[in-house]
Structure formats: structure tokens, C-alpha cells
Image: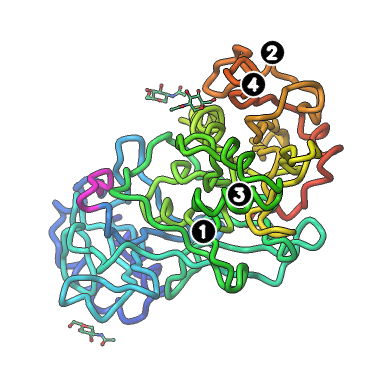
Amino acid sequence: MYWTTLTVLVTFSCLHLTVLCSADEHNIKTYSADYYDAKDCRLSVADNAVALKMPVPFRRDDLHRHSIIYPDSDGRLRVKFLHGFKMSCTTAGKFASADLSNVTEVLVVCAGDNSLWYLGREYAYADFVCNREPRSELTVTDETCQGDGVVVAVGFQTESAYLGAYRVCFDKATKNSLYSWYDSRSPYYDQHQSMKKRPSFVASRQLYGNTNVNKLYTVAQQRKTVAKILRSDSLANMYIKNDNNHSLSRGHYTPKADFYFGFEQSATFYYANVAPQWQSFNGYAWNHLEMWTRYRMDNSTGRRVIVTGTYGSCTLPDVDGVEQPLFLDPPTDIPVPLFYWKLYYDADAEDGMVYVGLNNPYMKIDESAYICPNLCPDGYRGNGDTSYVAAAGKNDENDGLIYCCSKESFEEVYGRLDPIVFRSV
Ligand SMILES: *[C@@H]1O[C@H](CO)[C@@H](O)[C@H](O)[C@H]1NC(C)=O
Ligand SMILES: *[C@@H]1O[C@H](CO)[C@@H](O)[C@H](O)[C@H]1NC(C)=O
Ligand SMILES: *[C@@H]1O[C@H](CO)[C@@H](O)[C@H](O)[C@H]1NC(C)=O
């Protein structure tokens, strides 16, 4: 019986990496029968000391698609005894230890507990550490989306596979991301490795050319830009405050904490995955919606597509009281949106809800803030809190309204979302 298992396993390995066959076969056969009673591998990845430079673990699923392996709710990767999987430092990196330093990817076999076989030798899981955190790549693809948009893919390139993280529909003409989307892992547990520090944002040259996006997001530069648009320094100083709340932050579309691994979270720090979002909205109401989304996914199985985007134009009254649309790079580039929206789509039920949030703390909330019929009672604040507090703030500021609409009613206003979003990758 064991020999049958072995034959299957060795065949599997040989299909993937010929060089492994002889060594592996030899090694596996020399182990005593006791080993076959050993438990499956349970590799702890919650431990941050290991986590920071851990390689990307992946394998082929039943449909022969490569996908990252995620831990159980106990923070451990489970691999069946004698089953193989791969680990990669991505083609841009390599393993740190001397005897692995000439490879970027390994096919290993679970030898029980924390032990893995690689090229005829037994290693501890902790021996597989990269020289740096595996690095994502941003690729501008040939595919279009939403008419003139171009599909931008962010993921991890390994020697044998491309492992996608999320994609963005980008409008090159205005350097504006329409939306970003990803398929949630399944089963999903609302847990993630904690990051030591936030990485800095990357502006892809292919998308932003020589534009200094970092500088455009500084508060000092925002004041200058808004002063120019409103033709008034004092108005700019009034709207762009130095209180770390009333300035435009880099508002993530696909949130970092939706991903489990640190290297995936780092992969969300591309300018293509953000838009200018008022911090008073970003850090409070919107943040709650993101937490609520993860809470809804917690313990869930099945495919969910999470799409996050923006819509409309955030305006402020200029020196003559005329509403002017805001841009970080006027007259047309990096527009400040009036709405953030998030579609929570259950692919099995083929149904979803769109959460729409108002990105203008200075706008008086009236009917115009509702672009589609609100299905949530009395407005919505994320995190299960449905108390209606919008427009209750001091100094005529609103706290950030969020409400929800059916996918259909949202699309009547926004336009149909490109079917590419719902296509399984
Ligand atoms: C990589 O290093 C190992 C161990 O030193 C060696 O056996 C193997 O031949 C090397 N592989 C390549 C492609 O150089
Ligand atoms: C998911 O399961 C864990 C463990 O049983 C539990 O603590 C948690 O509350 C569950 N989450 C939700 C949203 O029910
Ligand atoms: C920032 O703005 C939010 C939303 O209006 C508000 O709830 C919060 O108290 C403000 N924080 C600070 C530090 O002013």
C-alpha cells in the first residue's frame, strides 16, 4: 500500500523536476515504515521572525493552476505527508543559506512535522529563508478593461509559475485607476502576518512616466496644487489642514490586510492601487468597511471577488464660489474622486452588494450623495454599525457617509463592470 503511494508521489515529482527523481526516490524508499505514520507537515508561518523573508509557498491545484498555499486558522501551512510543494524567492531573489544560494525555487516533499526533503536531503522548514522579502512585479498587460482602460497585473514571478495577487483597471490618459480587484483565498480566515514597517509606494514608469507621484501627495504640495485650482492660498490652507486628517492620503483600493502574507501586503503598495482619499474618510469610515469586509469573509469558503474603485469628481468652491474639480496633477491627471466603492461579490451565488462611500468631508450631505438607492438602513458605517452619523460633524464637516446598493443599481450609474473582473484566473 505504501509503495503505491510512493510511486504516485515520485511520478508527480518527476513530472515537475526531473533532477529530483533519483535522489528523491532513493531517499523516500530508505525510510522505515514508522515514517509513514508520521503526521502531515504543519509549518508555522504566523511567527514573524520567519515570516518576513519566507519564500512564497505554492503548488498546483486540482485544475492544474498554480496557487499560493495559505495557512489554516492556526497559522500553519498543512501539507500531507509525502506530498510535494514548491517555494520560491521569486526570480528577483534567492535563498539565503549557502547550499541553496544557486536556486530561487525548490520543489520539496513533506517528510513529516517540520521536515522537508529537497534533492535527497532532509531540511527543516526554517532552513528555507530568502535573502529578502519576495518581491512582487507590476505588469501592464495587453488586455483592456472598461473601454479604454488597460489591465495591470500585480503578482509574483517564479521560475515555473506566475502567482497573481490582484489586478487594476487603469486609465493611462488621466493616470487614474478605475478599480482594483482580486479573488479571495478560500477558505478565508481574517488573519494576516503583521508587517514590521510600511513599504514606500512604487510608481510604475510605464504608468506614470516621470511624474513625481510621491511629491504630489505631500501636504505642502497638495496646498500648492489646491491653491492653484481654487485661486486662493487661504482657501487651500483652510481645506488642506495640517491635522493629519484633512489632507489627501494614499487610499488603498485592494487593502493590504486582505492578504495573509507580508510579501502580498507589500505588493499593495503601488500607486496604481491607490487614489487620493481624504484621511478623515480613509482612517475611519472606510477603514471600518474594510474590516467589515474581512469579517464577512472570515471562516468562509467559496470564491469571492472583491472589487474596489472610485467614481465621480471631488470638488471644492473656488475664490468665486464656483465648484472646481480637484486633481493632484492638474489639469487632468490623478483626479480626486468623489466616491469610493467596494463590490463584495459572491461568485457562487453570482450576487453582490456595492458599498459606496463619500470622499469629500466638506460636502453637505443631501440626496446627491446617493448615486443609487440605499439598501442599508439609515446609512452605513461599516463594522456592522448602522447608526447614521453622517453630516453630524463639527465645522460643517461630514464624517464620511457609506451606504449600500445592489450591484445592478450601481451599474446603472457607473456602467457595467467589465466581465473580465468576474472571470476566474
Ligand atoms: C546548486 O548547488 C548544489 C549544492 O551545492 C549542487 O549540487 C547543484 O549542482 C547546484 N546546481 C546548479 C544548477 O548549479
Ligand atoms: C471564525 O471562527 C473562529 C474560530 O472558531 C471564531 O473565533 C470567529 O468568531 C469566527 N468568525 C466569524 C465571523 O464568525
Ligand atoms: C478625523 O476625522 C474623523 C472623521 O471626521 C473623526 O471621527 C476623528 O475624530 C478625526 N480625528 C482627529 C484626530 O481629528
State the residue at coordinates (70%, 72%): 142
In which image quadrant can residue 322 be found?
A: top right
Nearer-N-terminus badge (2/4): 2
Distance CA(mark 3)–CA(mark 4): 24 Å
Nearer-N-terminus badge (1/3): 1
Given the image, on which type of amino acid does mark 2 rest?
Answer: Asp
Point out the stretch of residues depicted in magenta: 43-50
- Asked whether 206 or 350 is in front, the reply is 206
Disc ID at residue 396: 4
Dot 3 falls on a residue whose secondary structure is strand
The residue labelled by disc 1 is 270
Dot 2 falls on a residue whose secondary structure is loop
Density class for disc 3 (Cα within 10 Å; few <14, some 14-19, many ≥20) is: many
Mark nearer the viewer, 3 or 4: 4
Given the image, on which type of amino acid does mark 4 rest?
Answer: Asp
The image quadrant where one finds the C terminus is bottom right
Nearer-N-terminus badge (1/4): 1
Nearer-N-terminus badge (3/4): 3
Disc ID at residue 378: 2
Q: Position of residue 20 (x, y in %)?
A: 30, 76
Mark nearer the viewer, 1 or 4: 4
Given the image, on which type of amino acid does mark 3 rest?
Answer: Ala
